[in-house]
Image (spheres, grey):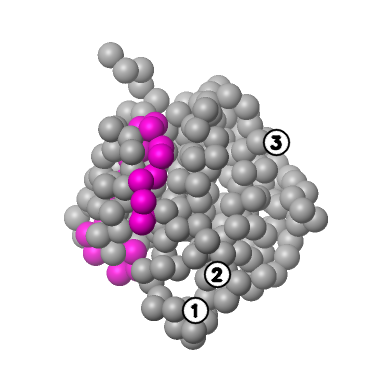
Amino acid sequence: MTTLSFLDVGGRSIAYRSRPGDGPTLVFLPGYASDMEGTKALAFDAFAERRGLAMRRLDYSGTGSSGGRFEDGTLSAWLEEALAAVDQLTSGPLILIGSSMGGWLSLHLALLRSERVQALVGIAAAADFTNWGFADGVEAERAGLAPAFWQSGQQLLLLDKEIAIDCPVRLLHGDQDNEVPLEIAFRTLRALRSADVQLTVLKGGGHRLSEPHEIEAILRTVTALLEPTP
């Protein structure tokens, strides 16, 4: 069992769990309104334990065990928290694993710490969802998305230009995802500069991709990234 700990980031108390082990360190980034105790996060923690790998997972401010109010959260603040966790709680090479919004954050982390990120795995990655998910800020607010979050997301858009990431990237997406269209996965694939990008489409998969066979597919993907290149 990993111990619940806290990291101060700009006066915000950010909850995290650390599993010691060998590198590369797995870093799991949950989705919007999700936390580090979800099905996929726990599956990765068990995976790291079995393989003797180091792992870090966190709750963004306003979610899970972290302090703050969820409605005050912004993408930029949560990116700041994820970056602080990477910088202060890990060393050496990283494999970033981002679910939904966490996939968007993972892309930004890979840009900011390119020298350390060995690979990136996006699970139903929702890059730029403030842009394609809503016509404008008014529509976003009506849908329950905080205006400040929508505005910060608009400052962190990625899909309208080349994403200067060169490490291996693995994207997994369900063909029945009603929250993040499959087309977003294809747009992400095309925007990435890396020559080593693979998209796996899971037949019948929804947005969560938390069914046992779906989690197994994700874990196989990470396992392959850990194997040495022949």
Quadrant hosting residue 124:
bottom left
Q: Which residues are magenta?
A: 159-180
Density class for disc 1 (Cα within 10 Å; few <14, some 14-19, many ≥20) is: some
Dividing the image into 4 quarters, which one contains the N terminus?
top right
Left or right: 201 as drawn, with respect to 116:
left
User: Is 92 or 192 nearer to us in this picture?
Assistant: 192
Residues 136 and 222: in front is 136
Q: Residues within 10 Å of mark 3 (few under 14, many from 20)?
A: few
Q: Secondary structure at mark 2?
A: helix
Residue 137 numbered mark, or none:
1
How far apart are the alpha carbons under marks 2 and 1? 7 Å
Q: Which residue is mark 3?
A: 88
Indicate whether 50 appears above or below 199.
above
Q: Residue 62 location, x and y as percent?
A: 66, 64
Q: Residue shown at 36%/21% (left/top)?
A: 227
Are the residues tagged 2 and 1 within 8 Å (C-beta)?
yes
In the figure, 187 relative to 26: above or below?
A: below
The disc, 2 or 1, on the residue closer to the chain's N-terminal end is 1
Which residue: 62% across, 38% down? Answer: 86
- Tell me residue 69's x, y (percent): 70, 70
Q: Amino acid at mark 3?
A: Gln
**Mark earlier in primary sequence (3, 1):** 3
Residue 153 versus residue 114 in the image, above or below:
below
Q: Position of residue 32 (x, y in %)?
A: 51, 63
Local SS, label 3:
helix
Is 174 inside the magenta-drawn segment?
A: yes
